[in-house]
Image (cartoon, coloured by chain):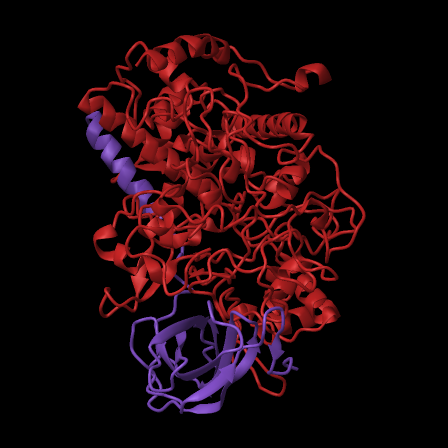
Chain colours: A purple, B red
């Protein structure tokens, strides 16, 4: 057998050997999306500094894509919530509820912001929830608002 | 060209000397104080960035690398040579052993660098789970010096363990790739070793450091073929892979391969080879990566022999703290949502975890990417390398304007990363992934040398570094960061926490990249004791546990550390004595080749 054929054969054999690892054993397919998702708690302010704020809320588990985003649409005019912030989380498959948290950056101090929230999978499909419009006011420079208690 | 010629002349002597180099074991202390390269060291660093013991520590590591190389050489000589048998031909009956041992020889061979002073393993030794082996580097400059001292990279040396288990980088669940999906797999913090060509992310990972200017630093991938052709184990490589080395290297090839990368401008192939010979060299380079990947998948590196593995098979009972830590890891701590351990997650007391132990050996990773919101670490060596070195190469022209966008930069084929082989589809998704780094396996995060049995102060401990930029210096800090990032946020940079606050305890500086923050963590509500229990559980993930003799590790080559343990302090503030004030982000805003490439980072401006 010539050298090239021998070489190709060894490459093929080694390739099988090298690819025999169960490398994708832990990658699970996406769960079936929940037929109905609803907000069970919040949305509410978790924390605010003079230039940032975190909003959190809880929904029934939307399932679907493990990679999920909480989405906040916000602005200083309740009629114009044109700014968007997203919070990346990974779902817990067996948990009945999911906590979403979203951090908004580059806010102005002592300013009232209006917001509404929803959520979506990393595939871009929304979960079909949307909150009423809520609001918070950022504190002055150097101050902070800790509105949500430390979880137990 | 004149510069190139002069460099070649200067390094030709090196090439000759390198071939007849001798082991360093007999070096005197005086010799050990000299930089082990023929060119003047590159030192653009202000005082205090390089650790004072760097040169002696580099030489210590060299001796340890050589020790392990000799052990693999002994295995090679003792091996019953495999023979090709059957159709298709198979290396019978010792093919597995042959590929593993060959991988060991290649991984620990210092000749695989221009100055013959750096192997792959120089930044990845067994006693740290194949991460960084020098405590003072882990405490200061974060990245490790390359063959050309003291060029250095930009990130923590990632552990080898279980890296071959990461699949080829792909996009899951994307009905419309323009919208997004979940990136899964790849190797490196930024995923730039995709595995698309060899169908092994890990094998392709092994191909990057040899030609990374900041690491092993060859100027041409064909240098791997040249140096293996000179090695004593060349016939072994030929037997395993069926290749020969009848490549007509030009007369200046050795000189070129003795010159660090970056000296030849943007030319990727300074060695003039015919098309046929280039194909042969490329083939050998592919087998280089495959050999090392097989080593890393073998029991030498990834043996599934931790206390936790023993627990899963009923051979070990977790202590009360370890068991509590496991419950928190899966539950309140929410670690299990990304570091999958085969058991479902519960978040609040009173809920019942209905999951069952995984039928496979859990890998403690989801193979995904996340931006955990680490602050910019001003100690990272790359920031200071903005002036030309001795061969006219400037490692980081952006200087303090560099920002590490991780996976987002890779998707844009940006500076310090690699070309994205699927940019036509994936580059448009970059802004949704800025700041994301690979979710490493939690396995072996706590591995240390036997004589320094912990990563945690007061010890005796082995100083490690955690996350991509080494900002975190202990596992206690790591858990505390996940737990309180959003409890103690401050609009400051590292080194500038307000008076009365202690950085990493009750002050977390702002994230380097504010976009795409992972919000699964940040406010977990763990008590101090619960943080410690999660640390205790993570310590059960260290390989080498033998239930029959639990005080002696079985992990291969873990006995090779010859340096010193550290003592004193406490884990909460471990390493804080080396904090330095971050340079002004206003004075040095993000560079245009990082933050100005479409799709630009959004929605928040990267400071």
User: Relative to B356, is B277 above or below?
Assistant: above
Residue at coordinates 55% horizontally, 21% vertically from top-left? Answer: B41
Q: Where is residue B517 in the image (x, y as percent from the top left)?
A: 47, 65
Residue at coordinates 75% horizontally, 62% vertically from top-left? Answer: B500
Depth check: A87 or B88 in front? A87
Q: Where is residue B455 in the image (x, y as percent from the top left)?
A: 69, 50
Q: Can residue B178 be seen in this view?
A: yes
Point out the residue furthest to the right here: B568
Q: Choose top left, top right, bottom left or bottom right for residue B556.
A: top right
Depth check: A147 or B550 in front? A147
Q: Where is residue B196 in the image (x, y as percent from the top left)?
A: 28, 48
User: Which quadrant holds the N terminus of chain B?
Assistant: top left
Q: Position of residue B275 (x, y in %)?
A: 18, 24
Q: Choose top left, top right, bottom left or bottom right for residue A121.
A: bottom left
Q: Can residue B307 be seen in this view?
A: no
- The number of discs equals 0
Is residue B374 found left or right of B531 in the rendered image?
A: left
Is residue B550 found left or right of B355 in the rendered image?
A: right
Is residue A141 found left or right of B320 in the rendered image?
A: left
User: Relative to B307, is B293 above or below?
Assistant: above
């Amino acid at each position: 057998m010539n050298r090239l054929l021998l070489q190709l054969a060894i490459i093929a054999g080694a390739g099988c050997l090298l690819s025999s690892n169960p490398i994708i054993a832990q990658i699970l397919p996406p769960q079936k999306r929940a037929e109905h998702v609803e907000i069970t708690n919040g949305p509410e302010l978790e924390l605010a500094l003079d230039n940032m704020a975190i909003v959190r809320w809880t929904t029934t588990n939307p399932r679907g894509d493990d990679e999920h985003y909480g989405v906040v649409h916000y602005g200083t005019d309740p009629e114009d919530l044109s700014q968007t912030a997203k919070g990346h989380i990974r779902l817990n498959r067996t948990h009945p509820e999911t906590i979403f948290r979203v951090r908004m950056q580059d806010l102005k101090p002592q300013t009232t912001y209006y917001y509404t929230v929803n959520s979506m999978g990393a595939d871009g499909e929304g979960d079909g929830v949307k909150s009423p419009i809520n609001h918070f006011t950022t504190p002055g420079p150097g101050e902070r608002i800790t509105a949500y208690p430390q979880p137990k | 060209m004149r510069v190139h010629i002069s460099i070649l002349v200067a390094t030709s002597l090196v090439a000759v000397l390198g071939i007849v180099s001798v082991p360093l074991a007999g070096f005197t202390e005086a010799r050990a104080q000299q930089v082990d390269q023929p060119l003047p060291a590159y030192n653009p660093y202000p005082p205090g960035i390089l650790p004072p013991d760097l040169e002696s520590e580099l030489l210590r590591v060299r001796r340890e690398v050589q020790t392990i190389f000799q052990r693999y050489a002994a295995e090679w000589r003792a091996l019953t040579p495999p023979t090709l048998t059957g159709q298709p031909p198979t290396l019978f009956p010792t093919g597995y052993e042959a590929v593993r041992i060959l991988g060991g020889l290649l991984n620990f061979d210092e000749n695989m660098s221009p100055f013959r002073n750096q192997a792959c393993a120089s930044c990845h030794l067994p006693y740290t789970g194949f991460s960084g082996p020098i405590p003072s580097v882990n405490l200061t400059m974060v990245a490790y010096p390359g063959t050309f001292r003291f060029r250095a990279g930009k990130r923590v040396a990632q552990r080898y363990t279980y890296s071959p288990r990461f699949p080829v980088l792909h996009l899951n669940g994307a009905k419309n790739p323009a919208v997004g999906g979940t990136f899964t797999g790849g190797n490196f913090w930024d995923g730039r070793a995709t595995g698309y060509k060899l169908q092994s992310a890990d094998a392709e990972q092994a191909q990057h450091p040899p030609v990374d200017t900041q690491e092993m630093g060859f100027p041409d991938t064909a240098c791997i073929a040249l140096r293996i052709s000179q090695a004593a184990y060349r016939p072994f490589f030929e037997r395993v892979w069926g290749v020969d080395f009848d490549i007509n290297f030009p007369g200046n090839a050795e000189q070129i391969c003795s010159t660090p990368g970056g000296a030849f401008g943007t030319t990727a192939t300074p060695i003039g080879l015919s098309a046929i010979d280039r194909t042969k060299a490329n083939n050998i380079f592919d087998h280089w990566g495959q050999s090392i990947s097989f080593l890393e998948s073998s029991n030498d590196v990834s043996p599934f022999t931790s206390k936790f593995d023993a627990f899963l098979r009923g051979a070990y009972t977790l202590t009360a703290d370890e068991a509590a830590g496991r419950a928190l890891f899966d539950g309140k701590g929410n670690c299990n949502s990304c570091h999958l351990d085969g058991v479902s997650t519960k978040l609040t007391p009173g809920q019942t975890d209905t999951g069952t132990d995984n039928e496979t050996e859990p890998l403690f990773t989801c193979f995904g990417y996340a931006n955990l919101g680490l602050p910019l670490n001003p100690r990272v060596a790359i920031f200071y390398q903005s002036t030309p070195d001795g061969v006219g190469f400037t490692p980081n022209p952006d200087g303090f304007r560099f920002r590490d966008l991780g996976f987002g930069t890779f998707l844009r084929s940006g500076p310090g990363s690699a070309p994205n082989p699927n940019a036509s589809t994936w580059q448009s998704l970059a802004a949704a992934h800025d700041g994301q780094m690979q979710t490493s396996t939690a396995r072996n995060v706590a591995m240390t040398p036997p004589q320094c049995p912990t990563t945690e102060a007061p010890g005796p401990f082995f100083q490690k570094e955690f996350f991509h930029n080494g900002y975190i210096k202990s596992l206690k800090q790591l858990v505390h960061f996940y737990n309180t990032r959003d409890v103690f946020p401050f609009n400051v940079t590292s080194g500038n926490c307000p008076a009365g606050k202690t950085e990493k305890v009750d002050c977390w500086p702002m994230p380097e990249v504010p976009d795409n923050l992972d919000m699964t963590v940040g406010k977990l509500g763990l008590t101090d004791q619960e943080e410690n229990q999660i640390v205790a559980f993570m310590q059960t993930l260290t390989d080498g546990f033998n239930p029959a003799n639990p005080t002696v590790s079985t992990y291969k080559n873990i006995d090779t550390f010859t340096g010193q343990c550290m003592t004193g302090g406490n884990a909460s503030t471990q390493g804080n004595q080396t904090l330095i004030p971050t340079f002004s982000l206003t004075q040095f805003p993000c560079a245009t080749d990082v933050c100005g490439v479409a799709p630009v980072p959004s929605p928040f401006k990267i400071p």
